[in-house]
């Protein structure tokens, strides 16, 4: 199977066609609970994909979406969700507007330190002072392990060099219908992630580690596949 290096732009429908059960059953419910418990007035899903999370958010909340992939945004539009502002360019997102930003599985898509810094700066810009960032990513400490429905090349076809930021690695996701997709993500240590967020004014105030999908026959009950950063926007 071909390995997609930029699957979000070049193979979005292929990615969405695989049922990512650990994300759906383990990660997304935690993100939704974090959102609804904070009762934001205005929310942005930055890197919204096809709108899987937005569809489950209480419509009383002002909802907005951004994704750099036109194909992902087209799939979001096909959901026909009411009252969602869709931004095609990050520069078009209004400043100091959102109480809460969701950044789910975006950090692993960042290829360079400069892009990471630009992303963090953009998030700080669009959040209100005191607003909340909820940033979810695959746990950088445990890439060498296989989980219920995904595994990586780290510790297998390539060494797991934890301290080497921006290292590309292969990810393989499979589902019960034997659909499979392979693509490239990028590794960022916890220390670098903390530093870049903090330098942008996004103070990390909480961490949540998400266990694997307990309903899956191949569940990994030893270590968590996901980690969520809760940050407060603290502009200078």
Image (cartoon, rainbow, N blue to C red):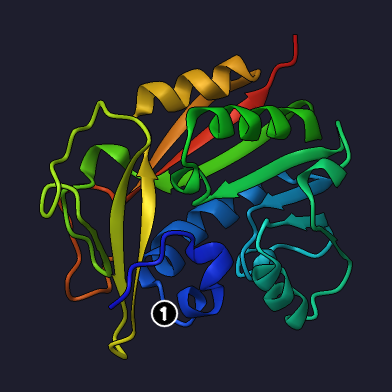
Q: Position of residue 97 (x, y in %)?
A: 87, 37
Q: Nearer the viewer, residue 57 or 77?
A: 77
Mark 1 surroundings: few (<14), some (14-19) or many (≥20) residues within 10 A = some
Q: Position of residue 30 (x, y in %)?
A: 49, 53
* Residue drawn at 69 percent across, 64 percent down: 54
Q: Which residue is mark 1?
A: 18
Q: Nearer the viewer, residue 35 or 48?
A: 48
Q: Secondary structure at mark 1?
A: loop
Quadrant showing the N terminus: bottom left
Quadrant of res 134: top right
120 up-or-down from 208: above or below: above
Residue extending farthest top: 236
* Residue drawn at 87 percent across, 45 percent down: 92
In this orientation, does residue 105 appear? yes
* Residue drawn at 79 percent across, 35 percent down: 126
Quadrant of res 122: top right
Is 214 positioned to the left or the right of 131 in the image?
A: left
Quadrant showing the C terminus: top right
Is 25 positioned to the left or the right of 117 in the image?
A: left
Q: Nearer the viewer, residue 157 or 193?
A: 157
Q: Please state the total of marks drawn on the protein image.
A: 1
* Residue drawn at 48 percent across, 60 percent down: 6
Q: Position of residue 51 (x, y in %)?
A: 66, 68
174 up-or-down from 135: above or below: below
Quadrant of res 47: bottom right
């Amino acid at each position: 199977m071909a390995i997609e290096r930029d699957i979000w732009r070049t193979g979005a429908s292929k990615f969405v066609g695989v049922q990512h059960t650990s994300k759906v059953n383990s990660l997304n419910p935690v993100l939704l609970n974090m959102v609804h418990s904070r009762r934001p007035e205005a929310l942005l899903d930055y890197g919204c994909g096809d709108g899987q999370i937005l569809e489950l958010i209480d419509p009383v909340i002002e909802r907005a979406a951004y994704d750099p992939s036109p194909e992902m945004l087209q799939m979001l539009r096909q959901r026909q969700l009411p009252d969602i502002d869709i931004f095609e360019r990050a520069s078009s997102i209004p400043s100091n507007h959102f109480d809460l930003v969701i950044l789910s599985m975006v950090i692993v898509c960042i290829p360079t330190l400069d892009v990471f810094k630009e992303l963090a700066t953009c998030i700080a810009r669009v959040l209100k002072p005191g607003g909340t960032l909820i940033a979810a990513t695959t746990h950088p400490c445990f890439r060498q392990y296989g989980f219920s429905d995904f595994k990586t090349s780290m510790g297998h076809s390539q060494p797991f060099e934890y301290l080497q930021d921006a290292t590309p690695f292969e990810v393989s996701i499979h589902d019960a219908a034997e659909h499979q997709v392979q693509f490239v993500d990028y590794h960022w240590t916890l220390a670098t992630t903390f530093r870049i967020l903090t330098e942008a004014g996004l103070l990390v105030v909480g961490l949540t580690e998400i266990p694997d999908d307990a309903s899956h026959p191949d569940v990994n009950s030893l270590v968590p596949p996901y980690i969520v950063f809760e940050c407060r926007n603290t502009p200078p």
